[in-house]
Image (spheres, helix red, strand yellow):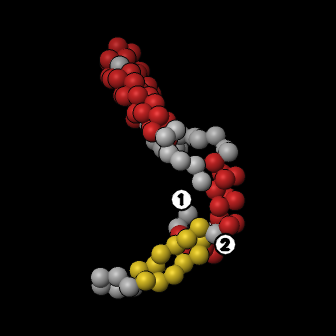
Amino acid sequence: MPSPKRLQALGYLSSRKEPGRTRPRTHYTLTDEGRDALVEWMHEPARFPRIQHEAITRLLAADLVGEQAVLDSLRALREEIADISARLDAAEAVASTIPQP
């Protein structure tokens, strides 16, 4: 994810300094160009983050530990996926109640 300073250099954010408890703080505001870029980005499909996935590593180890051990260890993913799906459904329900600008 780009840093606020980089986004400001690209023209997507503006900034101002305000007093803080111990030192001045930088507050960023989205520019019109930044809002346009955000709208354009929101029309792109969301993607899963590209990270090393433990389940893939377990699949690759099947030759060493046996298929049954891998299947047993991966079954827990079903519950986790169901939980994630339920939380996404709840988030969509809440999102539909938020007034649009």
Which residue occupies the foreground of this view, 1 or 72?
A: 1
Q: Is residue 29 left or right of residue 42?
A: left
Image x and y of residue 70, in percent? 36, 20
Earlier in the chain: of badge 1 and badge 2, it is 1
Placement of 51 over or under 34, stated as above or below = above
Image x and y of residue 31, in percent? 64, 69
In the rendered image, the residue lying farthest to the top is 68
Placement of 28 over or under 16, stated as above or below = above
- Quadrant of the snapshot with the C terminus: bottom right
Q: Which residue is rendered at x = 35% and y = 82% of the image?
A: 20
Which residue occupies the foreground of this view, 71 or 24?
A: 24
Q: Which residue is rendered at x = 51% and y = 81% of the image?
A: 16
Placement of 63 over or under 54, stated as above or below = above
Which residue occupies the foreground of this view, 81 or 75?
A: 81
Quote the CA–CA distance across marks 1 and 2: 16 Å
Q: Mark on residue 91?
A: none
Q: Mark on residue 1?
A: 1
Q: Residues within 10 Å of mark 1 (few under 14, many from 20)?
A: few
Which amino acid lies under the numbered mark 2 shown in the image of this protein? Gly
Q: Which residue is rendered at x = 46% and y = 78% of the image?
A: 26
